[in-house]
Image (cartoon, rainbow, N blue to C red):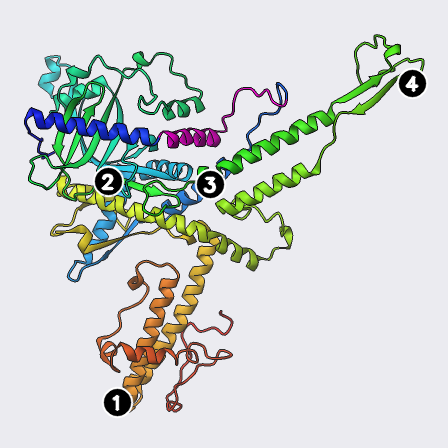
Amino acid sequence: MDELKVSVDESVRTKVINWVDEQITTALKDRVELEKRWVKWVNQYEEILPNKKTFPWEGCSNISVPVVPTAVETIHAREVNTVFAVRPYIQVKPKKEGADREKCQMLEMALDYIFDSILNIYTKGSEWFLEKDKMGTAFAKVYWHFDRKKVLKKKKLNLLERITGQNEWGFKFVETDKACFDVVPIEDLVFPSNSKNISTASFVAQKIRTQLHKLEAKEQLGIYENIDRIKPHTLSTTASPDTGVDVQRTKEQAEHIIRTNENALGEYELYEVHFDYDIDGDGFPEYTVMTLHRETRTVVRWTYFPYQHGRRPFIPLNYMPRVNRIYGLGICEMSEHLQDATNTVFNQTIDNMTIANAKCFKGRKSSRKDIGKIYPGKIFWLDDPTDLVEFMMGDVHQSNFLLHSLLRDYHERRTKVNDYTTGRESSIVKSRATATGTLALLQESGRHFDLIINNTRQAIVELAYQVLELYFQYAPYKVFQVTGKDGQMMNLELPSGIESLREEYEFYATATSLAVNKEIEKQSNLILMQQLGTIFGQMIQLLQAIYMTPLPDDVKNFMMGVVRAYFTLAEDLVRSFEKIDIKSYLPELPDLVKTAFGGAGSVEQMMSMMQGMVGGQNGSVGVPTGMENVPQEPSMGSDSSQP
């Protein structure tokens, strides 16, 4: 990697290290209460409760109702299936006049291959979405990774080498030089508490845990230095010394993992800090990246930011964004108090039923005697039957069940996860629901999900831009082995001559809300096909009348304006069906039609005349005034039964 190391005198170096360490310490202390809530949210999602309760009595009910996990996993499953169900993952369109449209397909195929075969987008993306759904915010890191490993490989020996008995096994260095995409846990990314977004924060620091052999290997490659200074300082605890909170241990305990010997694990904790600082004193800050071991204040790496796109490599993804804040609102936070209330009511109901089911007996003090063990069918021989009488300590209250249902309803309204989103029929409507009504409810219940998907689409697009920008910088002549349209393998190179990817080409994530339900998608496509067929039929009918019938020029120009109005209507129609590349659904209008009948204002005049021409009333084709004698032919694709 062609990076430039920062070279300053020792006084400036010490000053910068002190500033970085102070900033990290302050940011960590500012979020102590937030980290405690993170621990609670992890426990609620993993359904971790205290080992034992002593109130109202020892051994009472201690159950967690899976309110949060149900909502999180329902949204997560829909999101993953929506984003990764449509190929290509990214559609590319020219954004700037003069941009080569033929390069769009090359970029799409390259991105598809990189996402699938290099980034492992399905696995990493699923983890990214899950963290976001739970915690409200998830961070992805896009970077260029260079590494060299020594592996044992079998060599092909020639005849002479075989005769001389040379060993066919030998070590070989294998280099890795590619773009990478990692999910950064929310507790491992640190930034100032007053930050509004990642790009404008004064610093962003990633906590990195690694092993000694990896550090020494990077030192051999010239990436790290001063590793000897930090060798004795292995990580003794996963708890933050600045906050005292241990989110990492909470996650491990959820998996029933307990660290018995931290020193034996041999972990080292470093901070990769991206920050803007005026190093040379000219009044303008420089963007540099420092890898710091805070315990020993050892800098193992300090370089100017190497990526030419100039953007910080951390991509935030929010479930529900907050205004001018980095952290978003997640399902765990939305459900935090409702989860507590549901657990309380549910456990109280079980305790109440325990008391109600526990039969007790009352007897006369003067007639006390040993009655032995109690079992079904036992006969108690008493002088007076009233000496032993059954009584109940409590009764089952129906209000507990009503309160439980009320809490569930509130949670459904808060998270928008209801019967239809979980794939069940409505508990209220049940079998009385009609197919049309259910389809409408499914579409309406997807409004909230559309917002979630739009946030995800924007993050996926930013991921695609940064990945391709890294390849254009570090491997512009990379050749990818991709599958062509005919199913055969082909070599694909990145297109050349692109000066600015973001300025010349527009990226779109192909995921749409319609992909959530295949039946909805199919019905929508059928409706679009029918309506476009009607519009195309009317346009062809008018064009036939223009070129096959002798008409005055002003009438022909008028009819061409109608055709243009039809085309504008068709564009709006395709756009309303969430189709990204409109030009792939609509053919290009002839230049003669484009320039006829004045400018765009004339098209607006024509729109008022369209209602009677697209099918008319009762399926009849409307005709503009003064054109009754123009021969009318059957409309292509028209159907009086269509909507």
Q: Position of residue 558 (x, y in %)?
A: 30, 85
Amino acid of disc 1:
Asp
Mark 2 or mark 3: which is in front?
2
Q: Which residues are magenta?
A: 32-56
CB under 8 Å between callouts 3 and 4? Answer: no
Q: What residue did someone put label 3 on?
A: 334
Q: Residues within 10 Å of mark 1 (few under 14, many from 20)?
A: few
Identified at 36% across, 43% down, the residue is 318
Whole-angstrom CA distance, mark 1 to mark 2, is 64 Å
Q: Earlier in the sequence, mark 3 or mark 4?
A: 3
**Which quadrant of the rendered structure holds the N terminus?**
top left
CB under 8 Å between callouts 1 and 4? Answer: no
Kindly identify which numbered label has been placed on residue 201. Answer: 2
Mark 1 or mark 4: which is in front?
4
Identified at 35% across, 40% down, the residue is 327
Amino acid of disc 4:
Pro
Q: What residue did someone put label 4 on?
A: 385
* In front of the other: 584 or 401: 401
Q: What residue did someone put label 1 on?
A: 553
Q: Secondary structure at mark 3?
A: helix
- Say whether residue 151 is visible: no
